[in-house]
Image (cartoon, grey):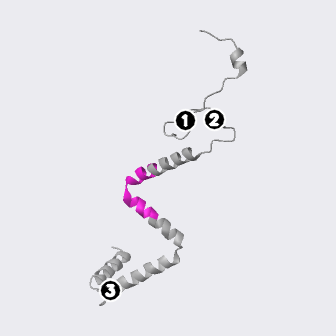
């Protein structure tokens, strides 16, 4: 064996008899928690929010796709229903009222003289 291998064996045999001091594990826990809190204080609130949202989405599972599709569908429907008619559209004033528009009288076209003089078309 080489000199290096012998030194490694001696170090390993010495480490076998080493034990941590009393209270080592309790102190380690306190130091670890303090380090975690310190790291949280260094992060911005935006990154903390995004981290929490990402964690929530990872834990939710496949329901996130269903909820996302539902929200997207609702947004598209609201956009379609709220889309303005445009400047070129004119409301139809010659239409008959719908059954739920009870208070209005139907609009009846009034014949004009030109319409009376026009020849009738028969099919």
For label 2, the SS is loop
Looking at the image, is 77 positioned above or below residue 123? below
Q: Is residue 12 left or right of residue 123?
A: left
For label 3, the SS is helix
- Which numbered marker is on residue 97? 1
Residue 114 position within the rendered picture, expressed as x and y whole percent measured from the top left: 73, 19
Mark 1 is surrounded, within 10 Å at the Cα level, by few (under 14), some (14 to 19) or many (20 or more) other residues, namely some
- The residue that disc 3 covers is 26
Q: Gap between marks 2 and 3, in whole Å?
A: 84 Å
Q: Quadrant of the C terminus?
A: top right
- Which numbered marker is on residue 113? none
Q: Residue at x 41, y 54 (%)?
A: 64
Q: Nearer the viewer, mark 2 or mark 3?
A: 2
Q: Residue at x 54, y 35 (%)?
A: 97
- The residue that disc 2 covers is 93
Residue 59 position within the rendered picture, expressed as x and y whole percent measured from the top left: 37, 60
Q: Is residue 76 magenta?
A: no
Q: Is residue 28 left or right of residue 117?
A: left
Q: Gap between marks 2 and 1, in whole Å?
A: 10 Å
Residue situated in front as seen by the camera: 13 or 64: 64
Looking at the image, is 71 positioned above or below residue 107? below
For label 1, the SS is loop
Magenta stretch, main secondary structure class: helix
State the extent of the magenta-drawn residues as a range. 53-69
Q: Residue at x 49, y 68 (%)?
A: 49
Q: Residue at x 47, y 81 (%)?
A: 38
Tag 3 near tag 1, CB within 8 Å = no
Q: Is residue 57 magenta?
A: yes
Residue situated in front as seen by the camera: 100 or 102: 102
């Amino acid at each position: 064996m080489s000199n290096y291998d012998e030194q490694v064996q001696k170090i390993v045999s010495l480490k076998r008899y080493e034990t941590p001091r009393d209270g080592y594990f309790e102190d380690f826990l306190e130091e670890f928690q303090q380090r975690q809190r310190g790291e949280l204080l260094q992060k911005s609130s935006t990154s903390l929010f995004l981290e929490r949202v990402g964690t929530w989405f990872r834990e939710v599972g496949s329901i996130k796709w269903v909820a996302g599709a539902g929200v997207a569908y609702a947004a598209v429907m609201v956009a379609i229903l709220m889309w303005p008619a445009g400047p070129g559209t004119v409301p139809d004033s010659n239409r008959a009222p719908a059954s739920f528009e009870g208070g209005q009288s139907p609009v009846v076209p009034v014949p004009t003289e030109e319409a009376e003089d026009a020849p009738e078309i028969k099919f």
